[in-house]
Image (cartoon, grey):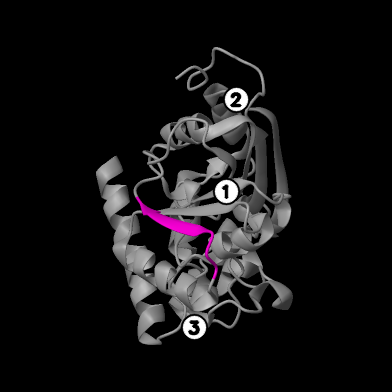
Amino acid sequence: MSTQSVREIVQEKYGEAARRVTSGAGSSCCGASACCGTDVDPITSDLYDEAQKSGLPQEAVLASLGCGNPTALAALQPGETVLDLGSGGGIDVLLSARRVGPAGKAYGLDMTDDMLALARENQKKSGVPNVEFLKGEIENIPLPDSSVDVIISNCVINLSADKDRVLREAFRVLKPGGRFAVSDVVVRGDVPEEVRRHMLLWVGCIAGALRDTDYRAKLAQAGFDEIDIEPTRVYSIEDARAFLSTEGIDVEAIAPQVEGKFMSAFVRATKPATACCAPGCCG
């Protein structure tokens, strides 16, 4: 599938998600609950505690389609500038803005008009001033070199068809010593292609998920160091059972090939504080 095709599919999917929330139809189709009527979505459920959700518009919470909580793990500091890649309805941007305080700033970058409109409305309702939502693609970040202290993202980089470019762009806009701190879905070990296609039916959120070893290699190639991948949720066949069964898939037959191999993870890396010659280091 071409990069353009992937982009169009993702844009349509998340545009529909925003429209569902805006119309009052509830959250959208990322994991099992929204797609198939099951009670608990193993990807998107229980990511934010009540204290974090307090004071946020309900629409921001409903539009959350992530697989983790990067704002809770990124150790954001007052006065820092944060960029959320694929910011959706804006929940992580608004939470980041709280953490960095009035002396800091939180940018949200999204390519989908409906999501941007929803995010800006959520900002207005929340009354958080130190936020700016930008339209653009995560493969072409519309910010200057060395302008951001921390990059976060929540189950979005896996959706890009050109992850190498995303990581190069992230490296470019980070200040020396800046931090890459994202939640993403990662594959651990080998998964047969047929199984990956079936799992893609289970949750669109794992589209294009990288193996953990490949993620590390791509980050290093972009110039990052201090790379770490920390599992936050490991998905079992039980998480996928209801949806896979409705698709006529023999769940028991594929269980051994799937069990424990898909996980949400917190991916950390740092842009070196000193000069280097890796791609993106020197402009």
Q: Which residues are magenta?
A: 128-135
Q: Earlier in the sequence, mark 2 or mark 3?
A: 3
> What residue is at 26 percent from the left and 48 percent from the top?
5
Q: Earlier in the sequence, mark 3 or mark 1?
A: 3
Of the residues tagged 2 and 3, which is closer to the observer? 2
Q: Secondary structure at mark 2?
A: helix
> What residue is at 62 percent from the left and 72 percent from the top?
45
Q: Amino acid at mark 2?
A: Ala
Of the residues tagged 3 and 1, which is closer to the observer? 1
**Residue 215, located in which quarter of the rendered image?**
top right
Write down the residue under mark 1.
Answer: 82
Q: Is residue 23 above or below residue 215?
A: below
Q: Residue 150 appears at what percent x and percent y? A: 61, 43
Q: Is residue 1 at least partly visible in the picture?
A: no
**Residue 24, located in which quarter of the rendered image?**
bottom left
Cβ atoms under marks 2 and 3 closer than 8 Å: no
Q: Is residue 120 above or below residue 190?
A: below
